[in-house]
Amino acid sequence: MNHSTLARIFRGVAVATVIATFVLVIVGGIVRESGSGLGCPDWPLCQGRVIPQLQGATLIEFSHRFTSSIVTVLIFATALIAWRQYRHDKWVLYPAVGAIGLLVVQILLGGITVLFELPPAIVGIHLGNALLLFGTLITATLFAWQPWSASPQAAHDNLPRLAIASLIGTFILIISGTVVTGTEAHLTCTTWPLCNDQLIPSGGILPLIAATHRYVATVIGLMILYTLIQTWRTRRNNALVMRVSFAALGLLIAQIAVGAIHVELAFPMLVGILHLASAAAVWAAMVVFTIVVYQTTARHAEQKADADKRDQTQLKPTSEPHGAWSTIKTYIVLMKPWIIGLLLTTTLAAMLVAQRGLPSLALVFFTLLGGGLTAGGSSALNSYIDRDIDPVMGRTSRRPLPSGKLSPRDALVFGLVTCALGVIILAVFVNGLSALLSLAGIVYYVGIYTLVLKRRTPQNVVIGGAAGAIPPLVGWAAVTNEVNLLAVYLFLIIFYWTPPHTWALMLMVTKDYEKVGVPMMPVARGESETRRQIVLYSLLMVAITLIPFALQALGGLYLIMATLLGGWFLYLAVKILRDGSKKSARKLYIYSNAYLALLFLAMVVDKSGFHIL
């Protein structure tokens, strides 16, 4: 058998082994969540037999052992082929052969776990060793598919160190979760993100264990997010690195969401299994991410030197003295208060509609404070990410970063701290659902829109519009601790309002985006197509604003106002289509802000009891 054929066989076997190991972790989670760990009380046999009666807990536990047997065969096959084909490639051979040692340890730990009747400490070690085995197999497989140089060029930044730190943090986080499950501490915390709505929960050691896991998750999550932001800064031209980093980000978001759902639904078994599966997927993604970062070069040294020079000239803080008030004003501008104002308007309106009146002033205060901080922090992170293009565009060149009033590091730290503080305020003083929705808005705006969509597709505004549509959901959840159909319609109204509002602005500053190569709709598809899209989305938006009346969720006053406001919106949109002037675009852009505020005001008045029809 020639080398190329053997290499193909190895890659196939290696992939099968990785998949089987992932399945084994999930089956282990099923055993744990279903309480079937002693379905086979003896070891290595089960009920004293090679194949026991397959029913109940015995069937589940035996399935785990049977899957382990398949993985064992695959690991030995992987090691054998690696010895023949990759004897001189240590990045494939060492992990493949080393997996046998980890496998032996895993088998012994499995036996000890059963014989000592599932002690939590051994269960945790058992899962930890499984993760190391899983990571080792991924390493061998990745190097077989992508034969990098054994001595990659040194990176020009700290990203490799950040990657390994995030990988270690992910490992610690998963193990801490195992401790929580093994001690059943999670059952003592019935709210999320805080444990029983307390920063330091009372009730003994178990709530403290569960709360500690959540705080560890927060720290590790922020560290991974920071690492991914640095990846975008330094490796944005490397398609492989970017794909892996986006996959890791998506899986991390999914893991957070599943954890929250697990608590909100009172810990159902299927969600618990999914929680473990998503954790294993995050671990796999971080293993791949770390390897790819270490094995790919950073940007060319000349590009790095140019970037450093630009940071020292355009982005270096000015040496002019600034007073305390001047510094405060600079940070306020960094938060883009003109955006915060509109977002908080929709948040407050949703609260008033949900309450059918005025909620408690304390609830309003903390909801708007938390929402304002998360919105402002997201804007600061957006400015940090876009600091390379903002100096080039006339519309943004005078903002704090391109003007040199703040350093990039200051903006990054301020954005992260402000976002975290806003989410914590909502979690502590409002409720977990509003905090979760606000966190989703941050991740969507910063991660999905700014990092992924903005510079890659002309549909960036359409898809990214969901971020700006979340504040009404936050306000609604703050009052009711749920999201109903009317709240969803508030979300959809803003979602469909965003494209015509934003594209009207883009028509006025198209040349700015052409300079920096950002594919906004007028740049990518032309101004004529943009004007047609404005009319289309305006029609959709107005149609959606009428649905709440049709469903009798809002009354006649709202219908009249929605019709009048929407009619004028459509008139201005059609006017842009006909004359194509920047003056018409400016009129629609200005009116669109007033339109949204007045439409939500009509909802508030209507829902407060003033009905005509």
Image (cartoon, helix red, strand yellow):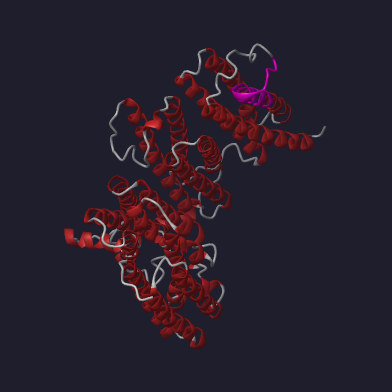
Q: Is residue 323 among what the camera can see?
A: no
Residue in the foreground of this view, choosing between 527 and 516: 527
Horizontal side of residue 100 vs 366, given as left or right: right
Q: What is the x, y in percent for residue 380?
A: 34, 58
Q: Is residue 327 visible?
A: yes
Count of picture labels: 0
Q: Is residue 549 above or below residue 49?
A: below
Left/right of residue 592 with respect to residue 528 in the rendered view: left
Residue at 30% x, 26% y is 204
Q: What residue sits 35% from the left and 33% below the top?
A: 212
Does the magenta-highlighted stretch encompass residue 63? yes
Query: Which part of the image, by quadrant, shows the C terminus?
Result: bottom left
**Height in image: 4 above or below 501?**
above
Can you say which quadrant of the picture contains the N terminus? top right
- Could you say which quadrant of the image residue 332 lies in? bottom left
Where is residue 513 shown, x and y percent of the image?
47, 71
Q: Main secondary structure of the magenta part?
A: helix
**Magenta region: which residues?**
50-72
Q: Residue farthest to the right?
A: 1
In front: 181, or 255? 181
| Quadrant in which residue 213 is drawn | top left
- Residue that sits furthest to the front in the current view: 613
Name the spot of residue 561 as percent of width and height, x first: 38, 77
Give the image location of residue 155, x and y in percent: 49, 44
**Does 146 lie within the magenta span?**
no
**Which quarter of the figure has residue 73?**
top right
Residue placed farthest to the top in the image?
A: 48
- For the point 52% across and 43% down, the residue is 293
Pick the residue in front: 441 or 264.
264
